[in-house]
Image (cartoon, helix red, strand yellow):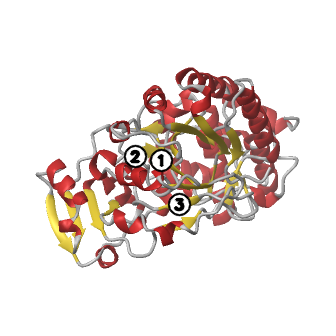
Amino acid sequence: MTDNNGAALKNHSRRHCGIDDMGQNKFLESSYFDLSFNAVFPKFGTNKSREIKRLIFEISKIEKCEPSLILNSIKDKNYASVKKILLQKRYPKNFSKIKSNSYYLPKYEIDENLKADLNNSPFDPKNIYFENGAQNSILFDNVKKKFPKAFFKEIPSLKIFSKEKPFSIADYNKRNSNLFIVKEKYDFFKRCPCTSGAANCGYSIMNLGMGCPYECSYCFLQGYQNIAGIVLPYNIGDYLLDEKISGAVKGLFDYKRIGSGEWTDSLVFDDITQFSKPIIEFFRNKPDIFFEFKTKSANVSNILSIDPAKNIAIAWSVNAPEISKNNEFKSAALEQRLESAKQCAKAGFKTAFHFDPIIYYKNWKDGYKQTIDMIFDAVPNDSILWISFGTLRMPAILKPIIENRFPKNEILNAELLLGQDYKLRYDEETKREIYTFMNKQIKSKKSKAIVYLCMENV
Ligand code: SF4
């Protein structure tokens, strides 16, 4: 920081660290801040005020400093100078290198009612809605036994039911109260859409439901799901038909890969659905296809009760311990995931690991090295089929949702830049540094696992 005003801001803010998130939010929300802001910058219009307030919020959050001090340090400047000072402060690494449209500065608006419910209560839906035909299914019987006190109601269809109940992000916290048992008619199987410009690995997806009871701060479902409930299909048999599966391709691998963990966690409901059993039995006889269950759970008892198959990979999404603890709420702890991996490997199943999303934070190297060490201590080297890396990226609209649902999150503190596809990502140099480091760590373990990047073009 060479600019005098920037230096002043730096010194001021460091002297007054210690304000808590709540205090900061209340302060920014308050009409007092608006009054102060309007008094300091009476001529800023709506858009200019939005940008500057947003930058003040982000800097004060990162540095845990009072917004008023930042405001005071820039009060005698015009809009262009103020914006420049604040952008330099907020994006010190990238400010001089990136285009002006790389900053995403939406209105800063916090609604306390939208906060994620982080109580770690077990999944226990109060309402079970089912489509006609569900009553004769194994899933329905399992649900009846598991949730005998729930209110059961037949609905004409999920589509009609949802139309009558418009969804907003405020309903997202209520999703664990409602379970929908539906007949999937079309969306059985698809090629992974990946992301534009990235090298597609050829993965195919079997969509065995929608919605997840876990609360990961970065979860894309928060900005995608538009049903206040968990949706599970009762017609698992329709998914396992040869003509549907035949669309799978090899892509970057020597074999086809299909997985079920896109719109939900593959195993979080397996004690209810028991889908793992027919899936493993079906793919056991298809050695050219590897089926992957991708999870953050330790829900592997059904899997451990079945004879292993060489083409079944039980995969865990993992993260640095600190990131996992502070962002992956309600899921199995990292140690529990790795204990399950150990058990599955011992039983003869293959394993896989996904570092996704990798978060850039102060101690990221130590954190990710620690998790890599933990993995290779837990499972034998030759059980691991593949390991993927993907750094944090998200549709821009997810940012205010995360701010509201996880006000204490630190994952948004990094320099996330807006791409042409309206997604936020780290800069190329940061991504390269992360991938190079991660690859080196895996290589140091003499791993034979296939290592690849997920949705990445570096
Ligand atoms: S486990 Fe996956 S699907 Fe579930 S909340 Fe976390 S990121 Fe979302």
Residue 394 horizontal/vertical position (percent): 61, 54
Along the polypeptide, which appears first: circle 2 or circle 3? 3
Mark 1 closeness class: few <14, some 14–19, many ≥20 residues within 10 Å: many
Are discs 2 and 1 less than 8 Å apart at CB? yes
Residue pictured at 74% horizontal, 59% vertical:
419
Question: Is label 2 in a helix, a strand or a loop?
Answer: loop
Q: CA distance from mark 2 to mark 1?
A: 7 Å
40 vs 99, left or right, is: left
Along the polypeptide, which appears first: circle 3 or circle 1? 3
Quadrant, the N terminus: top right
Question: Is label 1 in a helix, a strand or a loop?
Answer: strand
Along the polypeptide, which appears first: circle 2 or circle 1? 2
Tag 1 residue? 293
Tag 2 residue? 267
Q: CA distance from mark 2 to mark 3?
A: 15 Å
Residue 343 horizontal/vertical position (percent): 43, 28
Give the residue type that dot 2 points to. Answer: Leu
| Mark linked to residue 205 | 3
- Residue 443 visible, this angle: yes
Q: Name the residue nearer the viewer: 313 or 169.
A: 313
- Give the residue at the far left of this rendering: 149
Residue 125 horizontal/vertical position (percent): 23, 53
Q: Name the residue nearer the viewer: 453 or 50.
A: 453
Give the residue type that dot 3 points to. Answer: Ile
Residue 427 horizontal/vertical position (percent): 78, 47
Residue pictured at 70% horizontal, 48% vertical:
416
Mark 2 closeness class: few <14, some 14–19, many ≥20 residues within 10 Å: many
249 vs 437, left or right, is: left
Q: CA distance from mark 3 to mark 1?
A: 11 Å
Give the residue type that dot 1 points to. Answer: Phe
